[in-house]
Amino acid sequence: MSVVAAPPSRPIAVPSPAAAAAPARLPTPFPSREALALEATSRAGLETIFQNGSMPDLEGLVGWEFRGINRLPLNFIPFGQLVGIKKFLKGFFRGGDGRVMGYNSPVDSSNALDGRWNIKPKKFGFYEVHEVDATARDNEYLHALLLDYGKGGNKPYDVTRGLRDYLVQVSPDNPDLLLGKAYFAVGPARIGALNFFILERHRRGLTDYASR
């Protein structure tokens, strides 16, 4: 059984034969027309879609990896492609303490947006996933899940610790297509929204937790 590399201070997730929730449809290696249409939507349009979205099923995320597309504010400028952040991958797994956790992996952004996701093996930017607590500081959207990088075990000097992502399901009948909205924490202040991002179910990933 292979072990996924992670910082020593953090629990390590490994592949498991345990069953994961079935997707609404069979994932494909390419982004769907719906995902590409979201990427081409204006920020105002994405804001409306986000506000009308619903909370994703937390258990339905565990054991899956999702293709990610960053929709940056000046989308007509290929900044994301130039610096290699247009495409990415997010995965979700269950930690040994029962929490749902997640990670990011970089993806080669030099090919076409509707091409294959050439995923690199590195895993970084770990986060905890949970429903939004109305009494907590990060309570902007109560109908969303919160991806809290401050609780992911990232190093103190890791800039990703400040990220706070809200995630909604775009359509009630399609749990495979999600829309995210990113903020950044600086002490008690929150900067953003920095950008929107689109997630689409891609393949089975890490499911369970195991200690080294």
Image: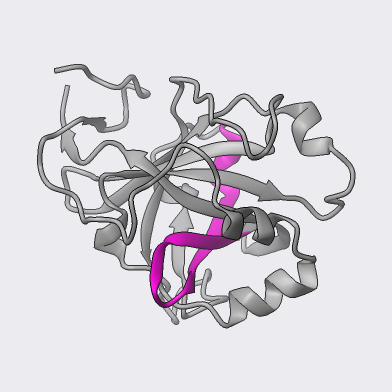
Residue closest to the eye, 176 or 209: 176
Q: Residue at x 46, y 63 (%)?
A: 146
Give the residues drawn in magenta, as a range: 158-181
Q: Residue at x 50, y 61 (%)?
A: 178
Residue 108 percent across, percent down from the top left: 62, 24
Residue 62 percent across, percent down from the top left: 27, 51
Q: Image quadrant for the C terminus?
A: top left
Q: Is residue 42 left or right of residue 140?
A: right
Res 21 quadrant in image = bottom left
Q: How is the image coloured?
A: one colour
Q: Is residue 62 above or below residue 174?
A: above
Q: Is residue 163 magenta?
A: yes
Q: Residue at x 76, y 37 (%)?
A: 80
Residue 134 percent across, percent down from the top left: 44, 81
Residue 186 visible? The answer is no
Residue 140 percent across, percent down from the top left: 57, 76
